[in-house]
Image (tube, helix red, strand yellow):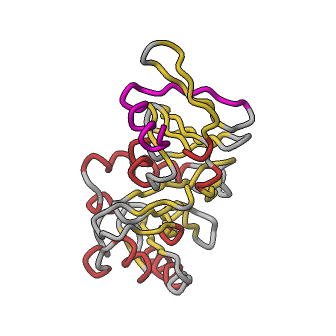
Amino acid sequence: MGQDNKKEIRGKGKELLFSLGIGVVVIDLENQITFMNPFAEKMLARIRNHVIGLNVQECHLPEHREGVNKLIKQTLESGDQSLPMVKIIDGPTTLLSVRLSPLLDSRDQRIGVVLVINDLTSETVVAEKETSPAHLMKLPIFEKGKILLLDVDRIVFMKSVRNYTSVHTYDKEFLSNLPLGELEKRFEKKLFFRVHRSFMVNLSKIEELSSIRSGRYHIRVDNKEKTVIPVSRKGVDKLRKILRF
C-alpha cells in the first residue's frame, strides 16, 4: 500500500479520535493496525504503541484468527455498505459489540476497515466478586441486520440451537450468538433456571409443572403458544427446591 493511502487512513482515524465513548480501530488492506483511539485501548486492554503496525491477526488467539480474517474479507467484499458486519466479543467481565465497515478514500475506493467498538457491559450489573461473570440485564440479539438490547425480564425461555441460542419472549423469537451455557453463567440464577440441557426458563414465567410419566416432568410457560418444555430428572429436584414444593 502506498504512503499516500496510509496517510489518508491515519487522517480519517484522527477524525474519529474523540468519538464519545466509542472505541475505534483502523486497519489497512494488509490487515495492519494503523490507528486505535483511547476508548478502544481501554476496552480491548491493549496499549496503542504496542499494537500500531501489527497485523490484526497477532492480537487474536490462533483458533480465532480464521474467523477474524473471514469477517474482514466479507467487509471488504460486501456490496452493501449500509449493513456492516457485526461481532459480539464476550469476556469474563465485558461484553463488546464490534461493527466492521469498509474505509473509503476520496474516490470511494476501499482502503481499509474501520472497527467501531461499543461496550455493552454498561447494561449489566457486575457481580460482587471481580472474578464472577457480569450478570446481564439486557441481552444483545439480532433482528433484521441490527443489534437490539432486549430486557432480560421480557424473556420467557431460551433454547440451544447448535452454537447459538433461540430467545423467546411472549410473542416473538430472536437469535443470540452466545451459547446457552454462557448465558446460564451470565443470567441471575434467582430469575433463570436451566431445566434441561437444551432449555433455560424464566422462573417467573412458569405456569405449570406436570408429571407425564414416572420420573418425567414438563413445564408449561406463559407465552402466547403456552409452550411445553421438558425438565430433566436432575432439573426436577432442583426446581422443587427453588419453587419450594
Front position in the image: 32 or 142: 142
Q: Residue 37: x and y, percent? A: 43, 81
Give the left or right position of residue 210, taking residue 94 as reference.
Answer: right
Residue 194 sits in quarter: top left
Q: Is residue 182 above or below residue 59?
A: above
Which quarter shows the N terminus?
Answer: bottom left
Residue under the image location 41 percent in, 77 percent down: 36
> Is 110 situated left or right of 126 in this image?
right
- Residue name at image x 32 percent, y 75 percent: 52
Query: Residue 88, image x and y in percent?
Result: 47, 55
Q: Measured along the vertical axis of the image, is residue 198 above or below residue 174? A: above
Q: Residue furthest top?
A: 213
Please give the name of the residue rendered at 42% of the width and 47% of the height, measured from the top-left corner: 184
Q: Dividing the picture into quarters, in which one does residue 39 lie? A: bottom left
Magenta stretch contains residue 237: yes
Q: Nearer the viewer, residue 78 or 40?
A: 40
Residue 82 lies left or right of residue 64; in this view the side is right
Query: Where is residue 50 drawn, in percent x and y?
Result: 25, 77
Q: Is residue 136 above or below residue 195?
A: below
Q: Would residue 37 be found to the left or right of residue 202 on screen? A: left
Give the magenta range. 225-245
Name the residue: 42% across, 67% down: 27
